[in-house]
């Protein structure tokens, strides 16, 4: 375990040294153990992203106040209450129906939630997210929801391959971000642009990202053990 902690610490050092100070590194921690995530925090990571609410709950209960927690996977509506309880930000508002359901829950609980809109910049039908041409209508709708504070946009882009392949998707998302920023709607401030993963974070930063979500380059290649740890059968 010691060696693994050292390796994670070295990886975190390497990444933090390459990332400008205004960019937040979110460690993407799906399938990782509380010890691995704790090592990343120990090494200087302050924001952790998780894809799965059920899997994240015991980890957040164990490590809680030591980090800020981002939900970075699709939120199922039956998990909204749990997600609101443990996460600090939901990066994956991807439909009007989900936004409405979160709004209702927040109103009942008397709390408000920080959120990003997930943009489907790659137009892949399998992927969730709001299409760029639907964003204007979407933000006008969201601006009326009193308990959701939209702070920006998140996008995935292609996961593997040449990082340059991601650049057009990141650029298109950044353009939408700037356009929405100029709208000055209530409940909407374009402060965060979350894009870029292990293979593409430097390109994403060049294209304006100020949140990058990095898993493999912090924790190493996922092993079978990690896949088993994940209750929902994570697809890397
Ligand atoms: C897994 C994941 C990441 C990190 O991917 P890596 O390639 O391991 O860095 C980032 N964002 C989301 C939404 C993820 O699910």
Image (tube, grey):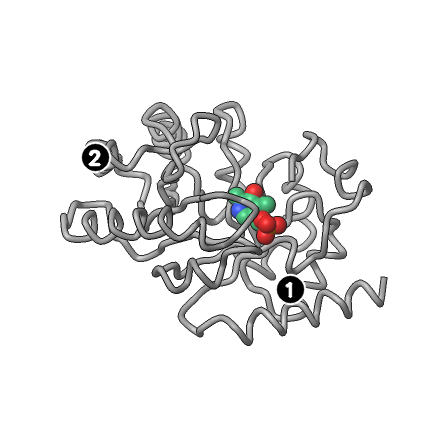
Q: Which residue sits at x=63%, y=68%?
A: 12
189 relative to 119, above or below: below
The label nearer to you, 1 versus 2, is 1
Count of marks placed on residues: 2
Q: Residues within 10 Å of mark 1 (few under 14, many from 20)?
A: many
Q: Quadrant of the N terminus?
A: bottom right
Residue 144, position as x, y percentages in the image: 21, 34
Q: Secondary structure at mark 2?
A: loop
Q: Is residue 43 left or right of residue 185?
A: right
Q: Is residue 29 left or right of residue 98?
A: right
Question: Mark 1 = which residue?
Answer: 41
| Residue 144: mark in rendering | 2
Residue 64, position as x, y percentages in the image: 61, 54
Q: Quadrant of the C terminus?
A: top right
Q: Secondary structure at mark 1?
A: helix
Specify the farthest residue to the left.
Answer: 183
| Residue 75: mark in rendering | none
Q: Which residue sits at x=66%, y=55%?
A: 63
Whether residue 28 is visible to the viewer of this picture, yes or no, is no
149 relative to 19, above or below: above
54 relative to 196, above or below: above
Mark 2 or mark 1, which is nearer the start of the sequence? 1
Residue 78, position as x, y percentages in the image: 52, 23
Q: CA distance from mark 1 to mark 2?
A: 36 Å
Q: Residues within 10 Å of mark 2 (few under 14, many from 20)?
A: some
Residue 232, position as x, y percentages in the image: 68, 30
Q: Which residue sits at x=71%, y=48%?
A: 32
Whether residue 129 is visible to the viewer of this picture, yes or no, is yes
Q: Is the residue marked 1 within 8 Å of ligand 1, measured from its CB?
A: no
13 relative to 67, above or below: below
Q: Which residue sits at x=26%, y=38%?
A: 146
Residue 139 sits in quarter: top left
């Amino acid at each position: 375990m010691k060696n693994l902690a050292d390796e994670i610490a070295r990886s975190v050092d390497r990444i933090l040294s390459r990332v400008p100070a205004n960019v937040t590194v979110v460690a993407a921690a799906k399938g990782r153990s509380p010890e691995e995530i704790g090592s990343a925090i120990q090494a200087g990571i302050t924001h952790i992203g998780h894809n799965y609410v059920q899997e994240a709950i015991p980890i957040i209960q164990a490590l809680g106040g030591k980090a800020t927690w981002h939900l970075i996977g699709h939120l199922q509506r039956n998990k909204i209450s749990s997600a609101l309880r443990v996460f600090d930000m939901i990066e994956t508002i991807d439909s009007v129906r989900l936004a409405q359901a979160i709004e209702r829950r927040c109103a009942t609980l008397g709390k408000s939630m920080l959120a990003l809109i997930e943009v489907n910049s790659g137009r892949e039908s399998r992927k969730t997210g709001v299409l760029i041409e639907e964003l204007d209508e979407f933000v006008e709708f969201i601006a009326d929801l009193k308990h959701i504070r939209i702070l920006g946009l998140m996008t995935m882009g292609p996961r593997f391959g040449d990082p340059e392949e991601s650049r057009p998707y990141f650029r298109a998302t950044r353009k939408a971000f700037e356009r929405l920023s100029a709208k000055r709607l209530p409940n909407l401030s374009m402060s965060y642009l979350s894009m870029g993963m292990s293979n593409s974070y430097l390109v994403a930063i060049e294209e304006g990202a100020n949140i990058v979500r990095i898993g493999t380059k912090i924790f190493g290649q996922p092993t079978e053990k990690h896949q088993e740890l994940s209750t929902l059968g994570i697809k890397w």
